[in-house]
Amino acid sequence: MKNSIYELKRTKEIIFVLAKNGFGEIIETLGIPVPLKKEVKLSRSERIRKTIEELGPTFIKLAQLLSLRPDLIPLDLAKELEKLQDRVAPLPFSEMEKVLVEEFGDYKKYFKDDFELLASASVGQVYKTRLINGDEVAVKILKPGIEEIIYADIFILERLARLVRERLLIYGIDSVKIIEEFAKSIKKELDFNIEALNLKRFKANFKNNPKVKVPKLYDNLSTKRVLTLEFINGIKINNKKLLAKYYNVKEIAKTGVELVAEQIFVHRFFHADPHPGNLMVSEGKIVFLDFGIVGRISKEERNYLLKLVYYVAHRDEEKAAEYVIKLSRISDETDLEMLKKESAEIISTYLYQPLKNINLQRFFEDLIRVMKKYKVYFKEDQYLLAKTIVTYEGVGKSLDPEFNVIESLKPYVTKLVKKIYSPKTLLKEFGEYNQNLAEFFIHFPNDLYEIIKKVKEGKLKIEFEHVGLEEFEETIKTASHRLSLSIIIASILIGSSMLLSSHIPPLIKDISLFGIIGFIFAFILAIILIFKSWRD
């Protein structure tokens, strides 16, 4: 009952905010009277951002996800949603303390200092404190009751998305698909155990790299709703003035891009949100924070991406366009030749200028526009990857105005491409291929025996799926109906003629009444048949 009341109240609130910001037509589509109509001068994308800000944390989280997915929404809207910040008024510690008590009981057995608020976001708050053993830690706590609120909002959004789907498709937005993506993403963010696992994997990947630092995780003080990490004193990477006092900022930018490249091309597991708030420098090492959003790519995707960057860096637009296509999901109706031609044209407009002058964000946006035109899309993690590279380029440029990701990656990628396609690596892959081939021949006799056994027992079933025959089947069916009707008309005409010539009673002025009725009926049927044929 409590949830139903909340859902009703929240739905009314959503409708009111939509109407206030000029989306009354969406509400009218649902058959709901618009509570108010207001003239607005802002663009559609600006109005959507303003609406989301007013609707609060769940919707801000949804918008942040959408800003990473230009395949789901228009590019201008994605850029507008990037302006949203996940900052909300903090809850008092007395409220947050309830979560600590529920998770640890008497939590003061583990923590000896007061909890000093460092940051507040929509789903959680971060505090600085000290453990009994003296270690300084950062404690991330999930807000009490936030799961119930977000799940209730998702339920409302799912219902609204289904209702307005057809209307929003006019704007190129598939509302149902968007909410499904959001539900998957937010459920991960509400479970700090997933973030802890991401952190452990990232830390293991860089255990032998002296240039990077990852906070220590306190497993015994981390749960689904509480995350306890080492507190690291450092300088935020966007504080150029302070960084320049202690470090060479150009070297910091260069080291950062090397670490990003290692994550993508070596580990194939990358921190997908490297904005300035999540990057620090401490004791000459780059510190990565917040592992809520990470990306993964397969070995094959990694190799394609390497070749794409390699050919972009070496100004070969034709080859680069080939690898754009290989990295994409392509539909049957896609004109591959035209896609390749237009992709190559986009790439060439950027390549024939100094690499340091290339605006990577604009390059990706132009490329995505061409891909959308041909209904071709990257996979989810590949959009995260593009966003990661573009975000880090912005970080690098804030430290060094001459910084360019492509130029910085060129020697690294060239070296890696040579290594991957070296005789030693190819020999190793050939060995793996031989192993797979050997396994096939080992299992083949047994698999063949199973097939023959099923044939003998009459249990072998082969299923055929007919594709594209529905239209042909419908044509045959229609033709059969028309032929049958034509035969019936012809039969009636012949029968009526015989009745008239034989003067079969009852008669009207020596003309058979049934003969006349038969002719009239045949005439009506013939008119219907002609009309249906003309209409089809």
Image (cartoon, helix red, strand yellow):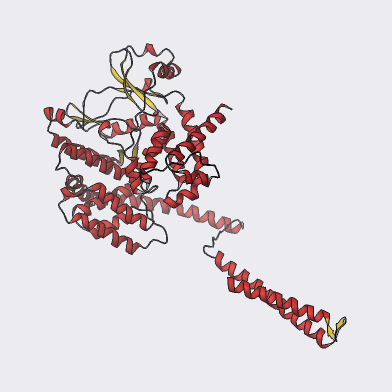
In the picture, measured across the screen, residue 294 lies left or right of residue 242, that is right
* Direction bottom: furthest residue: 501
Q: Position of residue 493 (x, y in %)?
A: 74, 81
**Residue shown at 32% from the left, 40% from the top:** 82
327 vs 181, left or right, is left
382 lies above or below 211: below
Answer whether residue 65 is visible to the viewer in this image.
Answer: no
> Residue 37, image x and y in percent?
46, 42
The correct choice, above or below, for 520 with respect to 274 in the image is below
Residue 388, x across and y down, in percent: 28, 41
Judging depth in this view, the residue of 353 and 528 nearest the camera is 528
Looking at the image, residue 312 lies above or below residue 90: below
Q: Looking at this view, is 472 or 87 the one in front? A: 87
The image quarter in which residue 117 lies: top left
| Left or right: 134, with 468 as reference point | left
What residue is at 58 percent from the left and 59 percent from the top? 455
**Depth check, front residue: 365 or 41:** 41
Quadrant where the N terminus is found in the figure? top right
Instruction: Give the total number of marks visible in the rendering.
Output: 0
Q: Quadrant of residue 250?
A: top left
Say whether residue 33 is visible: yes
Q: Position of residue 158 (x, y in %)?
A: 50, 40
Quadrant position of the C terminus in the picture: bottom right
Which residue occupies 29% across, 22% down?
Answer: 230
Image quadrant assignment for residue 129:
top left
